[in-house]
Image (spheres, coloured by chain):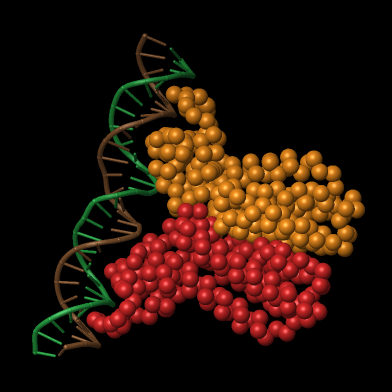
Chain colours: A orange, B red, C brown, D green
Amino acid sequence: MTGSTPSPDKECRTRGRPREFDVDEALDKAIDVFRERGYHGTSISDLSAAMELTAGSIYKAFKDKHAVFSAALERHITLRKAAMQAAIQTEKSGRDKVCKVLTTYATQCHGIEGRLGCLVVGSAIELAIFDEGIARQVNDSLMRNETMLAGLIKDGQADGSIAADIDGPVTARSMLCVLQGMRVLGKTGRAHEELLAVVDVAMKLLG
Amino acid sequence: MTGSTPSPDKECRTRGRPREFDVDEALDKAIDVFRERGYHGTSISDLSAAMELTAGSIYKAFKDKHAVFSAALERHITLRKAAMQAAIQTEKSGRDKVCKVLTTYATQCHGIEGRLGCLVVGSAIELAIFDEGIARQVNDSLMRNETMLAGLIKDGQADGSIAADIDGPVTARSMLCVLQGMRVLGKTGRAHEELLAVVDVAMKLLG
DNA sequence: TGACTTCGGAAACGATCGTTTCCTATAGTG
DNA sequence: CACTATAGGAAACGATCGTTTCCGAAGTCA
């Protein structure tokens, strides 16, 4: 969506020499570089090395560095959302689904993966102030997570696994804070058990 | 401590022309620039303009850009800690003190101040992976907050304001996650009431 | 096949980066 | 008063930044 191709996107879909690499595969590599170095800390040289493309080829596929980042962020969000939905669909009750969300985050936030961090959080911290577009992508993602949690809590209250008297939307927002907080803590390295213990405590919020 | 003066720090305390500016005042201005732009996003020109010093003068007082950042981070941590201790000392019970900590964060994280963000979180996200020294400063600060919260909870359990059967250390860590999570959410802008509602919910963790 | 279009890649672009150098000004020390 | 040491500040440094240009290669379309 966001400038992944500078061309008009209309007519002549396959004219000229076809691209030799897969854009999504290249973006997957870009994601990891941006995750560990941030936007300003990543140079085109870094991207070129990681994506195994020359700078010229990158600029053929993307308008500029910002467009690469925006596309990488979008893909990161999409992949994470899909993985999360796959993870929770095997759980039965609303409570179990919420618990699965929390433990999945706890797992993502520990060790090496935790130090790499989350592109959404990184974007929020580094770019949200000055970059309106990125801020919207970040906020949309956070709000979607918040809404998802609120939905799961509602499901839990409907199926009886979660107390009916708790405030779903606010509890969802509080849990979102716990999740994003784990991302911050994971950046300096936390043991898996430390974060799983946090999950246990956070589950008390469901009554 | 961290290279605020390149000189040997011994003997001849005031030889040569004295410095015309106050280092801490200059650091206060640097803090705000780093908070909004991050480390890599801040140039020496930016610092020069904000600190009202020429690049040369900055390099007279600090070894390099990294030393400016490290000193700014250290001062930021010190100031925040002092402000927090001042805020909670007027509260009586352990529970009230914990609540005060949470509401203070909620206030800091909303509106314009929230968008500026926290230098500790920013450092964690942007630098902790590759910069061992900064990672230690960040981790020390986070651990200190975690320990402080655990101490307040223990106080509360002693004075009867907090249930005796909760796990203090783990609850403290969970609350730290809530706090850092509010910092992330505050980066894209949240209303004060939204965050205060999160505090209300988080207080339920005390039983 | 020939015209056309896009790609991959190397090289070059001006701009800005973080840092140093150089010179003068201003203090303390003997 | 000389001597020494540091501050302030302008200018210059090489390096690297993000981006563009150029050209031969590799496809599609008529």
Name which residue lies at 42% across and 43% down: A46
Indicate whether B203 appears above or below C27: above
Lateral position of residue A159 relative to residue D9, left or right: right
Name which residue lies at 73% across and 78% down: B155
Lateral position of residue D13 relative to residue A173, left or right: left
Quadrant of res B167: bottom right
- Where does the image place residue B54, in percent across and percent down from the top left? 30, 70
Name which residue lies at 47% across and 37% down: A51
Lateral position of residue B12 relative to residue A133, left or right: left
Quadrant of res B205: bottom right
Image quadrant holding the C terminus of chain A, namely bottom right
Residue lying farthest right? Answer: A160
Name which residue lies at 32% across and 78% down: B10
- Where does the image place residue B169, in percent across and percent down from the top left? 71, 66
- Number of marks: 0
Indicate whether A19 appears above or below A178: above
Image quadrant holding the N terminus of chain A, namely top right
Tell which of B91 and C3 is nearer to you.
Answer: B91
- Where does the image place residue A203, in percent across and percent down from the top left? 79, 58
From this viewpoint, is residue A147 visible?
Answer: no
Lateral position of residue B138 relative to residue B66, left or right: right
From this viewpoint, is residue A206 visible?
Answer: yes
- Where does the image place residue A144, in percent across and percent down from the top left? 69, 51
